[in-house]
Image (tube, rainbow, N blue to C red):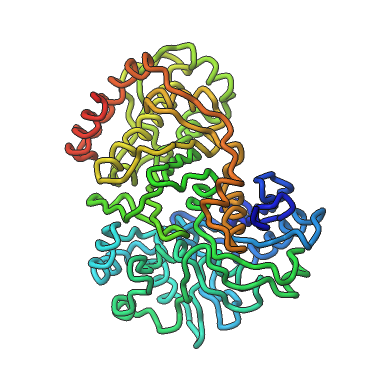
Amino acid sequence: MSDALSPDAVHLGLDLGTQSVRAVAVDGAGKLLAAASRPLTSHRDGIRHEQDPEQWWSAAGAACREALSGIDDGRVRGMAVDATSGTVLLADASGTPLTPALMYDDGRAADHADRVNTVGGAVWRRLGYRTMQPSWALPKLLWLLRHTDVPPGARLLHQADLITWRLAGRQTPGDASHALKTGYDLLADRWPAEELAALGVPDGLLPEVVRPGTVIGTVCGRAAATTGIPAGTPMVAGMTDGCAAQIGAGALGPGAWNSVLGTTLVLKGASPRPVHDPAGVVYCHRGPGGGWLPGGASSSGAGVLTRRFPGADLDALTGAAATTGSTAVVYPLAGERGERFPFRAPDARPFVLGEPYGAAEEFHACLLGVACVERLCLDHLEHIGAPVDGPLSLTGGGARNRYWSQLRADLLGRSVTLPEQAESAIGMAVLAATASGVTLERAAAAMVRDGVGLHPDPDRTARLLPSYLGFVDELVRRGWLEPEVAAHAHRRAGQ
């Protein structure tokens, strides 16, 4: 057994989320030894969403100190950090923030997105995502450059970059996962210099980039005193929070997928080759081992329950919904309009098919609607050539509702697993185990615990499929879904 996978070894995963920083200590057999978190606060004003980057460092230090407080320093083998995708700031040459952090969903760079897509369109199309959205990091960088007095030696930092800089006591390379939305060319393994120069991005502003899983430095003495992480601990280049959760679920073999149901629905999978989507709603990260991690994020998800049933007892509603037998469907947008995946429709709005009677049937229609979106995501992925025939895991807060998970398995007509402890911080602990030379696949095989398996009821699948196909046809009728994708969904349903 590798020393990294010995039960005595400890790997630290650090997750920089929107509402909190979470640290976990996991041994080589996947046992969660300790976990701690500290809250974060945001400032929201319309389309603006900012955080103070110094909060991340103070919260990370406190969470790490607590998580490691009962663990012998000699057991700690490595650590890795994940963060929200597309969150950026400008810092000076010493790493001190010059600006607030523009968070992953900050929308003020819309005026810059068109220019980014005009200048870099050929690169983005070659990479498979066609266009950049206004909330991506590169348009936000242009906004920052326009509204900031940028001194010589300034740096663009992704959220994780600030933490690894503080931990190492010097600037460390960024990882290709966080750099994707800043325009990093994952095929050529370099920044697209000509396009960035045309956009006015200064030389030296962007960090050196390495692939996830690369050792980028060690924890310095000053950071050790602040965080409790032993000085000299290797730091492994991390990934975005969605990719980290995928690692935590063990969805790494070709055709494997992890479906994360939180406020919105996110699907992340594994492929031996890049997946190109003509619709531009699927994009690929580069995996630590050189494979590809395609995925997409819907605007639909469990947020529909908060919006439609504020303050309700969701467990009681689930129990009542399970007895209805209703096949009505709600299109479950978490907000009032706009869809990103499995199709792009900025003007999409919620609708109801069928006539749900009472709160229990309406609640069931929302649960079934999310399952319909999930199946359509997989149909779209198969339609564009992504492998989808591997194992499927369900994670996120929605997966804790056992009835809902079974309903999803039934509509999908396929078996699913509910991993015992899949979260982004766990995924970073698994990635950290590679600091000792173990492959990510081997680390995941030793450290990811499968948990419960659910199998579809064929009779229920047959009963639910007409509702799904009616939902698909309604999306076409409204002009949001391409007829070719709908035809593929019908073909798959008939197989």
- Residue positioned 75% across, 66% down in the render: 230
Q: Residue 5: image x %, image y %?
A: 65, 53
Q: Is residue 493 left or right of residue 407?
A: left
In this view, 336 is above or below 309: below
Between residues 401 and 143, which one lies in front from this camera angle? 401
Q: Residue at x 43, y 37 (%)?
A: 391
Q: Residue furthest front?
A: 1
Q: Position of residue 56 (x, y in %)?
A: 63, 62
Q: Quadrant of the C terminus?
A: top left
Q: Is residue 330 above or below residue 196?
A: above
Horizontal side of 375 relative to 419 (left or right) equals left
* Residue 131 at x, y percent in the picture: 28, 59
Is residue 45 visible in the rendered image? The answer is yes
State the residue in front, 415 or 374.
415
Position of 309 with respect to 347 (left or right) is right
Taking the view exactly as shown, the residue that stands out farthest to the bottom is 152
Q: Give the side of residue 337 with respect to residue 17, left or right.
A: left
Count of numbered labels shown in the rendering: 0
Identify the residue at horizontal 46%, vertical 31% (top origin): 416
- Say which quarter of the image contains residue 127: bottom left
